[in-house]
C-alpha cells in the first residue's frame, strides 16, 4: 500500500511541523490584519503635488450639497442644524418667489460639509488641501505669485433651481478664474458629484446656452478650450428611480418627510427622473409598460403628486384664504407641468452622442449596493394606482415574480451603475453611453459617502495630478 502524500494529507505531517505551519499562518494573518486601512496619499503624491503648472480645480457639489441662507439676515434655512434635520419639513424652501419678492432671497452659503459624525465633503476638501496642496480661493482674488497657483474653487449653486442656472454660474466662474490667473486661455479641472456632474456634462456640451427650447441640440465646441479633465462621481446620467418615489411620497430626511408640495417647487428632482427612453416601468407580472412619466396627463389622471387630493388639501389649508389657496394649487400644478417639460428636454440634451474633443473624462461611482432602478405600476390596497420602486411595497403581487431582481440593480443606494455609466435597457433596445470615458473606478460605497472614500480620493488624485 502506498504511503499517503503529505502534500494532501496533513495526518502524515509531524506534530511539530503542523505547529510551525499553524504559527506561520497566524503570523501571516497578523501581518494582514495590521495593514493600514487606507493608502498613504501624502506619500503617494508628494512629488506630483509640486508641479508648478497644475490647473485650478472647480468642485461642484450635488443635490442639497450646499447650505441655503437668507441673503439679508444670514439665517440658515438648509440644513439648519440637527434639530431641523430631525423635525423640520422645510416648507420655507418652497417660498422661492415669495421670499425673493420681499428682498429676502435664499442663496447658497457654503458646502454642506457634514452633520454629526457623517461627513459629506470635508474629507474631499481636506485631501485636496493636504495631499494635493491646493488652497481654496474666492473668485476675484488675483494669483499672488507661483506658490499661489495651486487653487481650488467651489461652485455654490441653488440646487432648487434649474441646472441651467448653475451652468451659467460655472461659465462665469471659469471666466473669473482666468482673470484671477491673468490667462484668458487657462483650462480648469472639474470634480463634480451627483447632480453636479449633470451640470458639468451640460456645460461641456453646450456651454451657457439654453438649448432646451431649441428644435435641435447644437453642440457648443468651446468646452475643450476651457476644461482639461472632468471627474463625474455618482452621476445619474439616466436618472434615478428614487426621484419617482420622492415626487409621489416626499423626501424622507431623518425623522420627517419633506412634503411633495415642497419638492415639486424644485426643478432638480424632475431633472433626475429616469431617462425618457429608459425602460423602467413594469406591471406586477414583470412585463414592461410604455408609460410616459414626462406626460403631465400620466400624473393628472392618476391623481399623483401635486394632483392628489391630499396635496391639494394641504396647500389650500396653508393658504390665508380660499381664493389664495385655489390660486396656489393652480400655480403649483402649472409649475409641475413646466418642470416635467423642461426636464425631458434636459435629459435628451445630455443623451446626444458627443465627442469630448480631447477633454479627459473619468467616471467614478459605487456598484455594490442593490439600488432601486425600476418601478412597478402597482395597485394599492385602496384600489389606486401607484409607482413602487421597492420590492416590499408591491401590493398586487404575482406568484413567481422575483420583485427584488425586477426592481433592484447594483449601484450606490441612490443611482444604479448603469445610470452612472449612461447605459441601460431602453424602450427601443439598449441605451449606449453618450460620452467617451477615459477612466472608470467603482467601489463599495453609499452615494453620499463617495466623495470622502479614501480609495476614490486616491484614484481622483492620480487622475488629476499624474501626467
Image (spheres, rainbow, N blue to C red):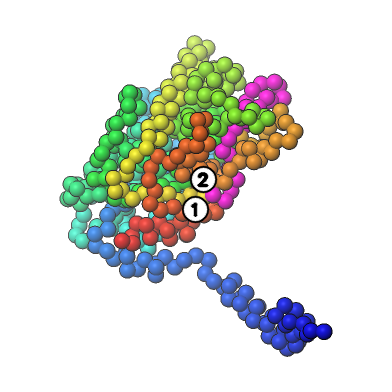
2 and 1 marks in contact (CB < 8 Å): yes
Residue 69 visible in image: no
Instruction: Tell whether 284 sits left or right of 84.
Output: right
Q: Is residue 6 above or below residue 431?
A: below
Can you tell which quarter of the image residue 384 is in? top right
Nearer-the-camera pick, 11 or 408:
11
What residue sits 33% from the left and 60% below the top? 465
Q: Could you tell me residue 177's position as x and y percent?
A: 24, 47
Give me the disc on residue 5.
Answer: none
Q: Could you tell me residue 344's position as x and y percent?
A: 43, 27
- Name the secondary structure under disc 1: strand
Instruction: Tell whether 7 sits left or right of 237.
Output: right
Earlier residue among tags 2 and 1: 2
Q: Which residue is mark 1?
A: 442
Can you tell which quarter of the image residue 44 is in? bottom left
Residue 144 visible in image: yes
Q: Which residue is mark 2?
A: 417
What residue sits 79% from the left and 84% below the top? 2
Q: Is residue 385 magenta?
A: yes
Stretch in magenta = 367-388
- Name the secondary structure under disc 2: helix
Amino acid at each position: 500500500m502506498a504511503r499517503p502524500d503529505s502534500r494532501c494529507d496533513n495526518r502524515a505531517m509531524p506534530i511539530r511541523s503542523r505547529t510551525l505551519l499553524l504559527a506561520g499562518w497566524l503570523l501571516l494573518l497578523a501581518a494582514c490584519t495590521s495593514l493600514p486601512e487606507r493608502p498613504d496619499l501624502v506619500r503617494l503624491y508628494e512629488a506630483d503635488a509640486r508641479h508648478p503648472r497644475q490647473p485650478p480645480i472647480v468642485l461642484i457639489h450635488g443635490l442639497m450639497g450646499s447650505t441655503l441662507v437668507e441673503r439679508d439676515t444670514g439665517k440658515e434655512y438648509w440644513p439648519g442644524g440637527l434639530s431641523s434635520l430631525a423635525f423640520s419639513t422645510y416648507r420655507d424652501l418652497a417660498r422661492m418667489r415669495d421670499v425673493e419678492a420681499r428682498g429676502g432671497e435664499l442663496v447658497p452659503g457654503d458646502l454642506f460639509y457634514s452633520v454629526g459624525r457623517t461627513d459629506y465633503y470635508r474629507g474631499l476638501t481636506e485631501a485636496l488641501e493636504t495631499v494635493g496642496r491646493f488652497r481654496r480661493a474666492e473668485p476675484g482674488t488675483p494669483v499672488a505669485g507661483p506658490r499661489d497657483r495651486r487653487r481650488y474653487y467651489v461652485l455654490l449653486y441653488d440646487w432648487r433651481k434649474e441646472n441651467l442656472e448653475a451652468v451659467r454660474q460655472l461659465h462665469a466662474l471659469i471666466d473669473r478664474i482666468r482673470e484671477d490667473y491673468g490667462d484668458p486661455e487657462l483650462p480648469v479641472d472639474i470634480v463634480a458629484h451627483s447632480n453636479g456632474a449633470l451640470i458639468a456634462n451640460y456645460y461641456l456640451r453646450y456651454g451657457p446656452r439654453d438649448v432646451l427650447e431649441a428644435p435641435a441640440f447644437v453642440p457648443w465646441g468651446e468646452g475643450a478650450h476651457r476644461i482639461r479633465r472632468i471627474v463625474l462621481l455618482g452621476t445619474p446620467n439616466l436618472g434615478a428611480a428614487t426621484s419617482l418615489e420622492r415626487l409621489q411620497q416626499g423626501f424622507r430626511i431623518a425623522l420627517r418627510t419633506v412634503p411633495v408640495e415642497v419638492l415639486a417647487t424644485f426643478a432638480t428632482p424632475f431633472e433626475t427622473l429616469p431617462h425618457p427612453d429608459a425602460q423602467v416601468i413594469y406591471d406586477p407580472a414583470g412585463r414592461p409598460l410604455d408609460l410616459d412619466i414626462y406626460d403631465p396627463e400620466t400624473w393628472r389622471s392618476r391623481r399623483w403628486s401635486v394632483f392628489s387630493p391630499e396635496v391639494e388639501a394641504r396647500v389650500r389649508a396653508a393658504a390665508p384664504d380660499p381664493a389664495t389657496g385655489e390660486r396656489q394649487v393652480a400655480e403649483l400644478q402649472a409649475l409641475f407641468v413646466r418642470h416635467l417639460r423642461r426636464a425631458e428636454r434636459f435629459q435628451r440634451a445630455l443623451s446626444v452622442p458627443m465627442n469630448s474633443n480631447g477633454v479627459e473624462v473619468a467616471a467614478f461611482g459605487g456598484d455594490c449596493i442593490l439600488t432601486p432602478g425600476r418601478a412597478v405600476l402597482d395597485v394599492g390596497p385602496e384600489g389606486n394606482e401607484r409607482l413602487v420602486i421597492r420590492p416590499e411595497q408591491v401590493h398586487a403581487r404575482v406568484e413567481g415574480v422575483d420583485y427584488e431582481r425586477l426592481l433592484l440593480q447594483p449601484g450606490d443606494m441612490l443611482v444604479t451603475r448603469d445610470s452612472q455609466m449612461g447605459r441601460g435597457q431602453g424602450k427601443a433596445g439598449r441605451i449606449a453611453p453618450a460620452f467617451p470615458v477615459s477612466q472608470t473606478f467603482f467601489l463599495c460605497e453609499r452615494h453620499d459617502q463617495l466623495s470622502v472614500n479614501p480609495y476614490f480620493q486616491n484614484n481622483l488624485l492620480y487622475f488629476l495630478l499624474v501626467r
